[in-house]
Amino acid sequence: DYRNRGISRSDSGAAIQGKAQVGHISGIYGGVGASTVDLAADSDANVEALLFGGYKGDYNGIEYDAKLTYNNYLGASGSDLDYLEFELIGGYDFDVFYASLTWAVSPDYINGSGVSLYYGGDVTVPLQEAWSAKAHLGFQYVGNEGSYVTDNVTDWSLGGWYNYAPYDVDFGLEYIDTDLDRNECVEKCGPRGVFTVSKAFLW
């Protein structure tokens, strides 16, 4: 399942995703990404395409990342799904765990949802060998309720990850949920267990 801030964009089915990114030693980067989607808001949309760019760096141990992303939905019958979002992430390694905070704003969020603000926090705890545990809590405000969700949303997740070192493949299993009932979302937003397999290729 492709869950974005607790809400499905693949109708609770499997999704295939990919991303290509280039960066400069200065911290500037940019790239493209794509994911298969299955949206109730527009059944003609079949691919979510991303165009993004940003700047990342480190200040006295505090890692930061400022990114601008344009989401475009290929095959959609209209343009209401498309949206632009600015995201700012800051993180710090406390040795026993890594914590990060996210703030994001969109002038007109997905499916004509109006102004959107998102606040999130993540904690990653390294465990024995290649294992780690992750927890997330976030809150999203939307200006036009009903286009995507009927109310503001609190989302959370908890899961475990394993890195298979010989091939550097990551496996993750997460429990994801929101404070909304199933009938309060245009897309599916009930509790879900999500299994993820990912691999990075570096040049």
Image: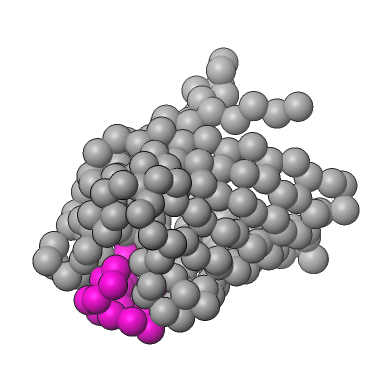
Horizontal arrangement in the rendering, residue 13 relative to residue 95 (left or right): left
Q: Quadrant of the N terminus?
A: top left
| Image spot of residue 178 (x, y percent) | 25, 64
Give the image quarter of residue 171.
top left
- Asked if the magenta segment contains residue 145, the reply would be yes
Asked if 170 appears above or below 139 in the picture, the reply is above
Q: Is residue 190 left or right of residue 56?
A: left
Whether residue 200 is situated above or below residue 165 in the rendered picture: below
Residue drawn at x 48%, y 31% is: 198
Looking at the rendered structure, the number of numbered marks drawn on it comes to: 0
For the C terminus, the quadrant is: top right
Can residue 14 be seen?
yes
Residue 85 screen position, x and y as percent = 55, 67
Q: Is residue 126 left or right of residue 13?
A: right
Location of residue 165 with respect to 174 vertically, above or below: above
**In the rendered image, the vertical position of residue 11 relative to residue 85, given as above or below:** above
**Quarter-wise, where is residue 161 in the image?**
top left
Residue 102 at x, y = what percent? 54, 68
What's the residue at 70%, 55% (across, down)? 53
Residue found farthest to the front: 77
| Nearest to the observer: residue 65 or residue 46 | 46
Query: Is residue 60 or residue 192 the one in the foreground?
Result: 192
Residue 114 image position (x, y, % from top left): 41, 79
Q: Is residue 155 left or right of residue 116?
A: left
Q: Nearer the viewer, residue 134 or 1?
A: 1
Magenta-colored span: 140-162
Residue at image coords 84%, 46%: 24
At 72% across and 59% down in the image, what residue appears? 54
The verdict on residue 161 being magenta is: yes
- Residue at the limit of the structure toward the top, as seen here: 166
Q: Residue furthest right?
A: 26
Q: Is residue 3 visible?
A: no
